[in-house]
């Protein structure tokens, strides 16, 4: 088993061990947020025929070449084409057809004049502007041609993709499976949120924050519960988790007298690949995998709340995104200018919790304050994680740094762009 890896080394090992989950068929109504495991080709042209982009009149453009508000062209309205119908008549010279948005263009017509540019007089329409050929006409196949690959495999299904799939007649679609993530904590001092905290007991918040981190990206969290600090109880909880794709435990992976998780999972058949990542917060991270192609990945996260969330963020989250078929696994990174001087001992990479502020064309990063691994409130304030390189001991105010953006709301705006 390897020990004391750099974050980059740990990340590389995890991604090499992480499989992409296979496909499953789901109803279109359940596909939002999933990743396509198939390329979707059009089986029809969209639109299926030339159709009108406006309510108005279908006509021959040559008939109204000289039309103006001062000298409108008079045409006889020969028939109407409602949306959803198939026209059976032809637009002849000197005539027009009343047409609604989306209705097929009748034979003979090559243009549509907007209703606002006309005036109806009995059975005639006065056209007040010239209408060039193909004006206000949506051409057959303008959106999609039959046989064209419209949505490639690996595309996340968003609202537009749902609409396109519906337009193509797809009620069922093939997507990558969602990983089931078994979540458990260990520690005699832990209780559920509604438990008795007397005598120094603390709430097992890690299980809930980790479950929320899973659900946020579309994975399926399965809460196994709290294991007591005995080999027997830890063994029982891990056995209950073996059917998951990923097992995430917090606490019990360090080197204390009652840190039994590593011993237990090895006896259950888990091969531990590494322990310890040179980062802060979050050094005591264990990673392994149970034998067999279907064996779950195992992440043993630290017990401190911030360390647990941080190691999930840096290692578990990218692995889950890979399993779900996402082509990109990591948070967006922005370049930010420090609003204060930061210091640390060299040797470990630090992820500094920061708030972000736009100042003109620049982004300024300011720490959330106390960076202790037990101060969970700092995570509620953090919009980003500033990368403080391992070999650096100081980053001065005004210097630039990379920041992982963890709060998507940072990219939102209070004002419209128009």
Image (cartoon, rainbow, N blue to C red):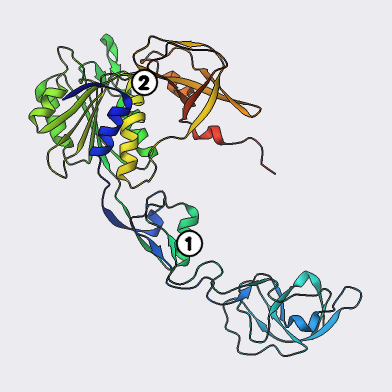
Q: Quadrant of the N terminus?
A: top left
In-image side of 369 versus 309 (left or right): right
Chain-order first, disc 2 or disc 1: 1
Task: Please name the residue that numbered disc 1 is placed on.
Answer: 164
In the image, residue 154 sits, relative to residue 110, either above or below, namely above
Query: x, y (%) of residue 56?
Result: 72, 74
Q: Is residue 166 left or right of residue 360?
A: left
> Mark 1, residues whose alpha carbon is within 10 Å: few (<14), some, or many (≥20)?
some
Where residue 171 sits, quadrant-wise, is: bottom left
User: Is 42 left, or right, of 220 in this rendering?
Assistant: right
Residue for point 36% across, 15% down: 374
Please report the residue visible at 42 percent of the width from the left and 11 percent of the height from the top: 393
Image disc number at residue 306? 2
SS class of the residue under badge 1?
helix
Residue 273: x %, y % from top left: 18, 29
Position of 170 compared to 46: left or right?
left
Residue 28: which quarter of the image? bottom left
Q: Residue at x 63, y 35 (%)?
A: 414
Residue 122 appears in the figure:
no
Depth check: 95 or 231 in front?
95
Secondary structure beneath disc 2?
Answer: helix
């Amino acid at each position: 088993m390897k020990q004391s890896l750099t974050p980059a080394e740990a990340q590389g090992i995890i991604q090499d061990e992480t499989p992409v989950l296979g496909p499953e068929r789901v109803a279109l109504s359940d596909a939002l947020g999933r990743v396509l495991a198939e390329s979707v080709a059009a089986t029809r042209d969209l639109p299926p025929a030339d159709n009108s982009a406006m309510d108005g009149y279908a006509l021959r453009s040559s008939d109204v070449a000289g039309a103006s508000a001062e000298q409108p062209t008079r045409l006889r309205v020969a028939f109407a084409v409602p949306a959803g119908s198939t026209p059976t008549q032809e637009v002849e010279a000197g005539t027009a057809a009343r047409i609604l948005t989306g209705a097929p263009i009748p034979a003979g017509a090559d243009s549509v004049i907007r209703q606002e540019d006309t005036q109806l007089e009995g059975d005639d329409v006065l056209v007040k502007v010239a209408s060039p050929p193909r004006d206000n006409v949506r051409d057959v196949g303008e959106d999609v041609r039959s046989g064209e690959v419209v949505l490639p495999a690996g595309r996340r299904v968003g609202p537009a993709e749902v609409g396109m799939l519906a337009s193509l007649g797809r009620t069922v679609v093939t997507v990558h499976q969602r990983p089931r993530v078994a979540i458990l904590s260990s520690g005699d001092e832990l209780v559920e949120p509604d438990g008795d905290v007397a005598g120094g007991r603390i709430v097992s918040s890690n299980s809930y924050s980790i479950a929320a981190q899973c659900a946020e990206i579309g994975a399926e969290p399965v809460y196994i519960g709290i294991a007591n600090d005995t080999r027997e109880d830890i063994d029982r909880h891990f056995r209950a988790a073996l059917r998951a794709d990923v097992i995430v435990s917090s606490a019990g992976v360090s080197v204390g007298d009652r840190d039994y998780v590593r011993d237990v999972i090895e006896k259950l058949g888990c091969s531990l690949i590494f322990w310890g990542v040179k980062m802060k917060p979050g050094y005591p991270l264990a990673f392994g995998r149970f034998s067999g192609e279907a064996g779950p990945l195992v992440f043993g996260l630290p017990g401190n709340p911030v360390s647990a969330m941080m190691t999930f963020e840096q290692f578990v989250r990218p692995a889950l995104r890979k399993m779900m078929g996402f082509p990109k696994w990591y948070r967006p990174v922005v370049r930010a200018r420090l609003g204060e001087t930061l210091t640390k001992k060299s040797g470990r990479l630090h992820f500094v919790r920061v708030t972000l502020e736009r100042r003109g064309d620049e982004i300024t990063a300011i720490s959330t304050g106390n960076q202790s691994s037990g101060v969970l409130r700092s995570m509620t304030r953090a919009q980003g994680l500033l990368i403080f390189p391992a070999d650096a001991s100081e980053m001065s105010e005004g210097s630039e740094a990379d920041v992982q953006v963890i709060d998507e709301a940072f990219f939102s705006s209070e004002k419209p762009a128009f």
